[in-house]
C-alpha cells in the first residue's frame, strides 16, 4: 500500500479562527495519524500554510477510511461524534468529543454486527442522524450521541449512497442506489416529504463512473448540495465534484476535478465563501485542491501533508 496513504490525515468538520493574528486562515477541526500510528484531533489550516495542531490523542481508538461518512460535528455544541474501533479488541464504538474542552465525553460500545454511516448533525439539537446497515436493510435513525437512544424513521432497500443535512430547507437528504437507480429521500425531522430519482449528466460516455457513495456535502455559500465521484477511462482515474440539480434530477459533472492522476479522498465546503477544499494524493505527494463552487471551476493545488481522508461540514 502507498506509504502516503498509510499516513492518514482525517479532517473532520468545521472552520475555526484560532486568533486574530491568524484570522486570514481557514481552519478545520481534524484527525490525523502521527508517526506513532496514533490518531490526533486538532486544527488544520485549509490554505495549506500552517501545520496541524494536535489537541487530543486517541490512544485507545483508531479510524478506518471508507466512503460511508462515519462522523459529524454539531456546529452549535462543537461535539464531534464518530464511529471508531478499539485497538486491542477491534470492537466498534461511537465516541463523542467536546472540541471546546478537547476531551472525550461519551464512549458507547455498538458491537460488530451493525454498520453505522451517513452521520449528519442536527443543527437544532444535540442529536445526529445516521444510517445503520444490519446486513439486510438500511435504517435511518435520529440518535442522541451521549446515550445512543435512537428513533428509527426510515427503512431503505438498497445501497447507501450518501447523506447530508441541508439547513436552508431544514431537511436531511439520504441517497441510496437500488436496481431501479439512484434516489434521494428527503426528511424533515423524521417525516419523509419527498423522493427524487437522479441520473448522471455531463460525463463523457466513454468513461466508467465507479459505483460508490457520493460523499455528499453542503455548500452554505451557494446553498447547494455537491458530491464526489471517481471516473475511469480504461487507463487512469480521476475524481470529479458533482452538483445535485434537484429540478432536473441530475448529478451533474463539473470542471472541479483532480489532475495528474491524483486521487481525491475528501472534500469540505467553505462556510462563508463559494469555495470547496479537497485533499488528495499522488505516488509522491499529498495536496489540497481549492475549487470555486459558484463557477464550478478549479482554483489551485497546494502541497500539504499529512493526507486528509475524511471531511465533514
Image (spheres, rainbow, N blue to C red):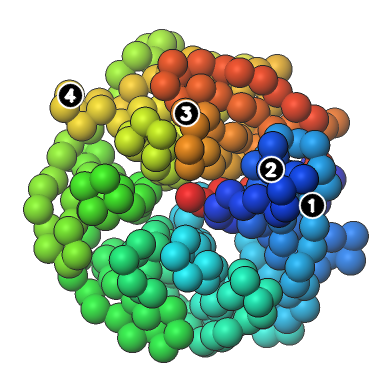
Looking at the image, residue 170 sits to the left or right of residue 53; the answer is left
Is 291 situated above or below 80?
A: above
Q: Where does residue 176 sit, x and y in percent of width and height?
A: 28, 48
The secondary element bearing badge 2 is classed as: loop
Distance from Cα at disc 4 to Cα at disc 2 = 40 Å
Chain-order first, disc 2 or disc 1:
2
Chain-order first, disc 2 or disc 3:
2
Write down the residue under mark 2. Answer: 23
Q: Do the numbered discs 4 and 2 sit on residues whose CB atoms are within 8 Å?
A: no
4 or 1: mark nearer the eye: 1
Which residue does the image show at 47% across and 55% down from the upper left?
A: 68
Q: Where does residue 67 sit, x and y in percent of width and height?
A: 50, 50
- Circle 2 residues within 10 Å: few <14, some 14–19, many ≥20: few
Looking at the image, residue 271 sits to the left or right of residue 89; the answer is left
Distance from Cα at disc 1 to Cα at disc 3 = 24 Å
Distance from Cα at disc 4 to Cα at disc 3 = 22 Å
Chain-order first, disc 4 or disc 1:
1
Chain-order first, disc 1 or disc 3:
1
| Badge number at residue 248 | 4
Which residue does the image show at 37% across and 69% down from the upper left?
A: 128
Chain-order first, disc 4 or disc 2:
2
- In depth, the one of 127 and 305 nearer the eye is 127
Looking at the image, residue 265 sits to the left or right of residue 68; the answer is right
Write down the residue under mark 3. Answer: 274
Write down the residue under mark 1. Answer: 52
- Circle 4 residues within 10 Å: few <14, some 14–19, many ≥20: few
Q: Where does residue 282 sit, x and y in percent of width and height?
A: 76, 30
* Number of marks in the rendered image: 4
Hey, which quadrant is residue 31 in on the image?
Answer: bottom right
The secondary element bearing badge 4 is classed as: loop
Is 31 situated above or below 26?
A: below
Hey, which quadrant is residue 86 in on the image?
Answer: bottom right
Amino acid at each position: 500500500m502507498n506509504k502516503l496513504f498509510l499516513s492518514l490525515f482525517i479532517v473532520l468538520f468545521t472552520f475555526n479562527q484560532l486568533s486574530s493574528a491568524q484570522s486570514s486562515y481557514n481552519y478545520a477541526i481534524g484527525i490525523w495519524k502521527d508517526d506513532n500510528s496514533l490518531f490526533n484531533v486538532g486544527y488544520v489550516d485549509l490554505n495549506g500554510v500552517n501545520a496541524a495542531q494536535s489537541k487530543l490523542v486517541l490512544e485507545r481508538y483508531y479510524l478506518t477510511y471508507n466512503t460511508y461518512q462515519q462522523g459529524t460535528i454539531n456546529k452549535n455544541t462543537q461535539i464531534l461524534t464518530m464511529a471508531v474501533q478499539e485497538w486491542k479488541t477491534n470492537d466498534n464504538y461511537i465516541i463523542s468529543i467536546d472540541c471546546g474542552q478537547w476531551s472525550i465525553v461519551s464512549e458507547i460500545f455498538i458491537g460488530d454486527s451493525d454498520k453505522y454511516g451517513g452521520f449528519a448533525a442536527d443543527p437544532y439539537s444535540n442529536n445526529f442522524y445516521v444510517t445503520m446497515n444490519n446486513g439486510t436493510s438500511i435504517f435511518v435513525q435520529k440518535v442522541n450521541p451521549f446515550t445512543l437512544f435512537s428513533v428509527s424513521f426510515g427503512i431503505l432497500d438498497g445501497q447507501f449512497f450518501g447523506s447530508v443535512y441541508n439547513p436552508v430547507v431544514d431537511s436531511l437528504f439520504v441517497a441510496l442506489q437500488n436496481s431501479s437507480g439512484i434516489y434521494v429521500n428527503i426528511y424533515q425531522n423524521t417525516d419523509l416529504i419527498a423522493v427524487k430519482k437522479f441520473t448522471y449528466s455531463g460525463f463523457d460516455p466513454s468513461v466508467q463512473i465507479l459505483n460508490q457513495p457520493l460523499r455528499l456535502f453542503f455548500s452554505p455559500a451557494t446553498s447547494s448540495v455537491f458530491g464526489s465521484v471517481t471516473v475511469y477511462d480504461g487507463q487512469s482515474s480521476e475524481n470529479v465534484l458533482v452538483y445535485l440539480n434537484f429540478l432536473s434530477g441530475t448529478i451533474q459533472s463539473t470542471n472541479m476535478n483532480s489532475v495528474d492522476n491524483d486521487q481525491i479522498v475528501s472534500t469540505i465546503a467553505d462556510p462563508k465563501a463559494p469555495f470547496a477544499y479537497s485533499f488528495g494524493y499522488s505516488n509522491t505527494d499529498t495536496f489540497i485542491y481549492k475549487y470555486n463552487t459558484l463557477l464550478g471551476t478549479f482554483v489551485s493545488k497546494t502541497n500539504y501533508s499529512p493526507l486528509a481522508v475524511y471531511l465533514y461540514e
